[in-house]
Image: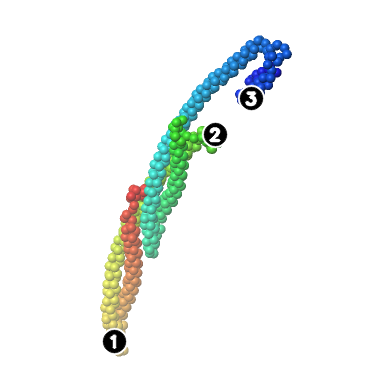
């Protein structure tokens, strides 16, 4: 019984039982064993041999040594693992910090590019805005010349009779109106394009500024992350954060997004710069066209006024001569009437003589030489009076013709005076001033 107790105790020690269980079991078995004393044995014999005793000890030694070796190996492996993991953690953290630093450099580069492009875009918007204002001022300046041209056409409609002619002045005035309206139409089209281009420029600027704002925020966050250390304040556990992926872009798409924004802005700037050049060319071209046509109209007016003044002078000369001829014809008529009156008494004398001699008696009523002479005298005087009256009638007809000519000349003179007044005073008076070239290209 004692040997079995020892075996049970040995198994309990080798097993996983606690020390309290071993002590309890030992006490129970010892109590049982007190009943057996060597004197009670029926035979004098031992339960184990010395070899068993030594073998048990060696087994314990080996088990102890194995346990210690396992524990030492575990301790060494654990220490090595702790060191390796510590180094790996430091390397990983250093690599992460390096990656964040590289990311900060990338963000700084794109921030610099964005800032540079935004500055260029702001400059371009300012330049295009200035050109747009100049275009608006130039367009407003064309209203004055257009109104002057239309007023000139309106005034010249007040010409009368034969002077209401489609002359070179009217042709040039109509062309001037067409030129100015054509210039206005081209200016309005370019103004609409400038407004649309400004909207596109501002939209591109807005995209750049929004991208820049996002990068400033991202740089601030990454800079704070880059400076975080194991001893920093504010670090904490965020369970499951590694399983979350809120990313919406990859490095290639991230850089491409900003690059596309910059390329789009550069494209808009190029279009804006081209539009500015076109507007500059347009302003110079329209200014030259309007000035050339203005000068052409003025030359036509000058020539027409000179022609009108020369015609008026000729009419006045002819009127003066006609008036002089009327005066002389009137004097002639008076002379003819007086001559006719002067022939009345001689005719009366001759006819009275014939009548008196016709009362001679009998044979005394002779057709003698005095009778023939008196008949001839009467006929001569009557023929003279007849011719004088015909000449008087012709003179009176000539006088009427001269009077009609005088009326026509005076009417034509009034027409020419009216036309000259309209062209010289009304039209040229309003065309004395024309916007200067700087004003026509938008400068004040």
Which residue is at 51% across, 35% downward? Answer: 237
Q: In the rendered image, which residue does mark 2 sit on?
A: 242
> What colour scheme was applied to this rendering of the protein?
rainbow
| Position in image of residue 167 (x %, y %) | 39, 57
Q: Taking 164 as reference, is 253 left or right?
A: right
Q: Name the residue located 52 percent from the left edge and 21 percent from the top edge.
A: 79
Query: Which residue corresponds to mark 1?
Result: 356
The quadrant holding residue 19 is: top right
Q: Earlier in the sequence, mark 1 or mark 3?
A: 3
| Residue at horizontal 47 percent and vertical 27 percent from the top | 94
Q: Within 10 angstroms of label 1, few (less than 14), some, or many (20 or more) residues?
A: few
Task: For marks 3 and 2, give the CA distance.
Answer: 53 Å
Up-down: is 165 above or below 221? below
Residue at position x 53%, y 34% from top? 250
Please tell me whether mark 3 or mark 2 is closer to you in this view.
Answer: 3
Q: Residues within 10 Å of mark 3 (few under 14, many from 20)?
A: few
State the residue in front, 22 or 147.
22
- In the figure, 66 relative to 151: above or below? above
Extreme-right residue of the structure: 42
């Amino acid at each position: 019984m004692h040997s079995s107790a020892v075996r049970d105790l040995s198994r309990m020690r080798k097993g996983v039982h606690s020390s309290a269980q071993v002590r309890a079991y030992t006490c129970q078995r010892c109590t049982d064993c007190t009943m057996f004393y060597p004197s009670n044995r029926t035979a004098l014999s031992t339960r184990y041999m010395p070899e068993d005793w030594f073998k048990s000890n060696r087994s314990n030694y080996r088990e102890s040594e194995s346990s210690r070796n396992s524990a030492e190996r575990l301790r060494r492996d654990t220490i090595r693992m702790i060191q390796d993991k510590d180094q790996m953690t430091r390397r990983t953290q250093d690599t992460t910090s390096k990656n964040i630093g590289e990311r900060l450099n990338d963000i700084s580069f794109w921030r610099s590019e964005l800032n540079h492009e935004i500055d260029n875009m702001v400059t371009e918007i300012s330049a295009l805005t200035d050109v747009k204002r100049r275009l608006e001022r130039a367009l407003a300046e064309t209203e004055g010349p257009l109104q002057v041209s239309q007023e000139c056409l309106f005034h010249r409609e007040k010409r009368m009779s034969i002077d209401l002619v489609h002359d070179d002045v009217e042709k040039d005035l109509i062309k001037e109106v067409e030129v100015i309206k054509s210039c206005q139409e081209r200016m309005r089209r370019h103004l609409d394009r400038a407004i649309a281009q400004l909207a596109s420029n501002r939209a591109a600027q807005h995209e750049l500024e929004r991208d820049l704002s996002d990068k400033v925020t991202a740089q601030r966050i990454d800079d704070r992350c880059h400076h975080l250390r194991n001893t920093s304040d504010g670090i904490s556990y965020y369970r499951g954060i590694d399983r979350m992926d809120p990313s919406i872009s990859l490095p290639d798409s991230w850089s491409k997004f900003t690059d596309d924004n910059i390329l789009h802005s550069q494209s808009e700037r190029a279009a804006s710069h081209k539009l500015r050049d076109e507007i500059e060319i347009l302003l110079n071209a329209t200014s030259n066209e309007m000035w050339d046509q203005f000068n052409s109209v003025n030359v036509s007016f000058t020539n027409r006024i000179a022609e009108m003044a020369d015609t008026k002078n000729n009419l006045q000369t002819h009127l003066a001569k006609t008036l002089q001829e009327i005066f002389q014809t009137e004097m002639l008529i008076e002379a003819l009437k007086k001559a006719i009156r002067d022939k009345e008494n001689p005719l009366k004398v001759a006819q009275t003589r014939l009548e008196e001699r016709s009362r001679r008696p009998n044979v005394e009523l002779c057709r003698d030489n005095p009778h023939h002479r008196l008949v001839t005298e009467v006929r001569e005087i009557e023929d003279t009076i007849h011719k004088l009256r015909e000449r008087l009638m012709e003179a009176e007809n000539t006088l009427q013709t001269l009077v009609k000519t005088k009326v026509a000349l005076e009417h034509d003179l009034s027409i020419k005076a009216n036309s000259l007044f309209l062209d010289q005073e009304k039209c040229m008076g309003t065309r004395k001033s024309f916007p200067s070239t700087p004003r026509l290209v938008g400068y004040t």
